[in-house]
Image (cartoon, grey):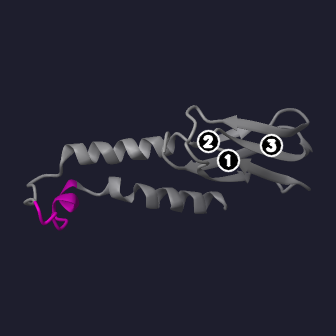
Amino acid sequence: MNQAAMVVLLLAQLQPVLETPSALASRPSDVSRPSPASPDVRQIDERLRDVQQKLRKIGTVTMGTTATGCVITFNVAYVAAPHCTVTWQATPLVSQSYTVSNTAITLTQTATSGDLVNYICVAQSGG
């Protein structure tokens, strides 16, 4: 997946948070309670925290000198492995691969120096 596709995926995830308060207030309300005049602040805070958790798992790493691998360890382990996409910014090497576990992304590649690698993972910490 290229960077443009990653941005589209991220924007789709952010769509509910980016809605205006008037759009939130005009949504059909739950049948069991009346529609509030303004959006529920707790709901907005929950959505924002959800997005912030997802955004913590986006980054770029620089591979070392004559590197054949790298491990990106998550700051908080997941209960199950998250869904991650990894892209190398340079011309494709003979070998480029990665695996994802609940604690880390492990990159392997043909020996080279200073390659930049982008990653994005989507899942909840602890979930």
**Location of residue 20 in the rendering, given as x and y in whole percent from the top left corner:** 25, 56
The residue mark sitting in front, 3 or 2, is 2
Q: Secondary structure at mark 1?
A: strand
**Location of residue 116 in the rendering, given as x and y in whole percent from the top left corner:** 75, 43
**Along the viewing direction, whichever of 117 and 75 lies nearer the viewer:** 75
Q: Left or right: where does residue 87 sit relative to residue 15? A: right
User: What residue is shown with label 2?
Assistant: 59
| Dot 3 crowding, Cα within 10 Å, few <14, some 14–19, many 20+ | some
Vertical placement of residue 58 versus 94, above or below = above
Identify the disc placed on residue 115: 3
**Location of residue 94 in the rendering, given as x and y in whole percent from the top left corner:** 92, 56
Give yes or no for contact between labels 1 and 2 (Cβ–Cβ under 8 Å).
Answer: yes
Q: Secondary structure at mark 3?
A: loop
Q: Left or right: where does residue 25 sit relative to residue 63? A: left
Task: Identify the image quadrant of residue 7.
Answer: bottom right
Q: Name the amino acid, label 1.
A: Asn
Q: Earlier in the sequence, mark 3 or mark 2?
A: 2
Residue 25 lies in the magenta-colored region: yes
User: What residue is shown with label 1?
Assistant: 118
Residue 99 seen in this snapshot: yes
The magenta region covers: 21-32
| Dot 1 crowding, Cα within 10 Å, few <14, some 14–19, many 20+ | some
